[in-house]
Image: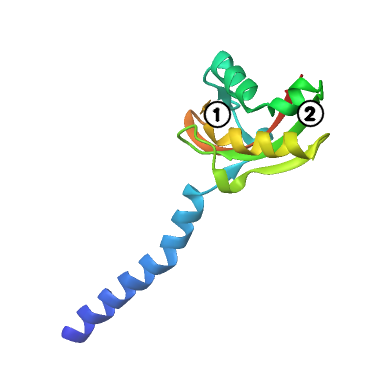
Amino acid sequence: MFSAFRRQAVLAVAVLLVLSPVAARAQDAVYSPSELDVQPRLTSQEMTARQLARSYPTALQRAGVTGTVNIQFVVDASGKVDAGSIRVMSSTQAQLAEAAKGIVPEIRFRPGEVKGKPVASMVLLPIVYK
């Protein structure tokens, strides 16, 4: 009798160990834009514009240097940028790329949605300094 109970307990633990990584992967899934029912959106365009203006390097702005930074990152299910996911895809100026990388974690979004639920999703954002 004890051995039958023990076998069931061991089996239950084994099932939990096998299923736990699957559940974790499902929660950590990052969706591409084409997989989303609703795309992530800025919570405030005005606030984001102020943040980006503040990040514009003063020396470049005074010199009239403009440019575009295409930056990719993950917006999590709460609308926050995952700072570890930030990647500069292209930039016309290295200093602008650094400025954009520094400000992106402060930008807030309404998260993307799948079947009415907020999910983590990949975002490609062009940031134009002019």
For residue 107, what is the image quadrant? top right
For residue 42, what is the image quadrant? top right
Per the model, the C-alpha gap separating discs 2 and 1 is 17 Å
Question: Residue placed at 52% from the left, 20% from the top?
Answer: 43
* Numbered label tally: 2
Bin the neighbour count of mark 1 within 10 Å (Cα to Cα): few under 14, some 14-19, many 20 and up.
some
Quadrant that contains the C terminus = top right
The type of residue carrying mark 2 is: Thr
Seen as rendered, the residue at the extreme left is: 1
From the image, tell me which residue sits under label 1: 107
From the image, tell me which residue sits under label 2: 68
For residue 23, what is the image quadrant? bottom left
Q: Is residue 69 visible?
A: yes
Of 3 and 78, nearer the camera is 78
Of 95 and 97, nearer the camera is 95
Looking at the picture, does residue 46 appear above or below residue 69? above
Seen as rendered, the residue at the extreme top is: 46
Residue 17 picture location, percent across and down: 39, 68
Q: Secondary structure at mark 1?
A: loop
